């Protein structure tokens, strides 16, 4: 189950200093290892310069407080002087957050808010009457926190899926690879294992290698950008003589459906599973020119 922290009220999400202290005192034990440690070692001081914010005056030590303080102090102009807890004018000094770096505190707040078990009245008072609640979404949905443009009220929204036309280079690369592997893969008479083939076409540089159940193709566009296509040898079975078994190489993630819409192109940083084949594609030797699917 995915869990998101939202503010369902006008104005958007915010967390006050008083609310942070309340959550740490009421819910911190068992969530924050530092909080428990400091409870067991009350005389030990953890300094701000050590990277962990300690508030000895009130006996508060927690990564949640650390994050709140880091974000709050980074947004205040102190004219070259280091801001300290003593500079806070009131217990309700507020940190507003929604997107960007400040949004990281949302995930940290989730286990604290959960531990309130629905008893939000005192927390809401401490938080300047700004409610923060948890929305649960089943796994498998690609979603995130969104706010109403007029009121600032937040909710969780499933992101829409958008399809764009591929670049001409990508279309050419897919067509060239599909054309080359459009043969019965159970027979090895049309390709050689671990041999690098040059399928370049229309200004798109394409090199392909097959080995066992796998294959890889490196595609270089006109700007020199490299992407990879990975292939798998798949076997399909039929129940009649008219439709015998079929063994073919297919480009991974090319067959999309309502439930899968992965991009078949993989950037150069995600090729470790096919490292051996990629190394062969990067080599300069043992290449063979293929023109329109036939040997040239």
Image (spheres, rainbow, N blue to C red):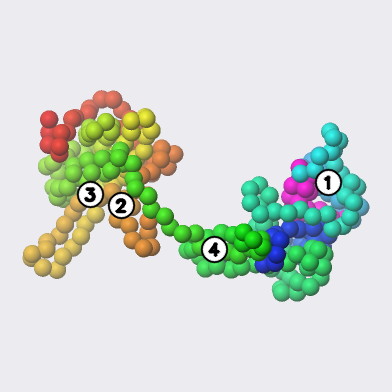
Of label 1 and label 2, which has the lower sequence position? 1
- Which residue is the site of mark 4? 157
- Which residue is the site of mark 1? 46
Disc 1 from disc 4: Cα separation: 40 Å
Kindly report which numbered mark, 3 or 2, lies closer to the viewer in this rendering. Answer: 2
Dividing the picture into quadrants, the one containing residue 9 is bottom right
Question: Disc 3 on helix, strand or loop?
Answer: strand
Of label 3 and label 2, which has the lower sequence position? 3
- Residue 282 in view here: yes
- Which residue is the site of mark 3? 249
Q: Residue at x 79, y 55 (%)?
A: 94
Q: Is residue 25 left or right of residue 219?
A: right
- Pointer 3 with pointer 2, Cβ within 8 A: no
- Residue 196 in view here: no
Question: What is the x, y in percent for residue 263?
Answer: 37, 49
- Which residue is the site of mark 2? 254
The local crowd at label 2, few if under 14, some if 14 to 19, many if 20 or more residues have their Cα within 10 Å, is some
Question: Disc 4 on helix, strand or loop?
Answer: strand
The part of the chain drawn in magenta is 59-74
């Amino acid at each position: 189950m995915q869990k998101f922290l939202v503010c369902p009220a006008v104005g958007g999400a915010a967390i006050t200093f008083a609310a942070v202290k309340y959550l740490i005192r009421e819910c911190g034990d068992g969530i924050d290892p530092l909080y428990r440690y400091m409870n067991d070692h009350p005389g030990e001081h953890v300094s701000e310069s050590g990277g962990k914010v300690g508030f000895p005056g009130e006996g508060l030590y927690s990564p949640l407080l650390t994050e709140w303080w880091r974000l709050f102090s980074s947004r205040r102009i102190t004219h070259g002087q280091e801001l300290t807890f003593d500079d806070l004018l009131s217990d309700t000094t507020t940190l507003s957050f929604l997107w960007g770096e400040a949004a990281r505190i949302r995930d940290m707040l989730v286990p604290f808010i959960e531990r309130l078990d629905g008893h939000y009245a005192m927390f809401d008072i401490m938080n300047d009457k700004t409610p923060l609640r948890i929305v649960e979404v089943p796994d498998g949905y690609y979603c995130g926190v969104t706010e109403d443009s007029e009121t600032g009220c937040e909710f969780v929204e499933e992101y829409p899926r958008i399809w764009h036309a591929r670049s001409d280079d990508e279309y050419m690369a897919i067509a060239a690879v599909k054309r080359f592997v459009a043969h019965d893969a159970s027979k090895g008479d049309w390709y050689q294992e671990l041999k690098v083939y040059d399928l370049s076409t229309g200004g798109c540089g394409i090199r392909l290698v097959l080995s066992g159940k796998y294959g890889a193709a490196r595609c270089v566009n006109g700007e020199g950008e490299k992407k990879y296509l990975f292939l798998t040898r798949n076997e399909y079975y039929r129940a009649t003589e008219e439709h015998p078994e079929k063994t073919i190489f297919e480009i991974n993630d090319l067959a999309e459906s309502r439930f899968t819409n992965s991009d078949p192109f993989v950037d150069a940083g995600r090729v470790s599973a096919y490292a051996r084949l990629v190394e062969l594609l990067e080599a300069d030797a043992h290449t063979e020119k293929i023109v329109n699917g036939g040997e040239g």
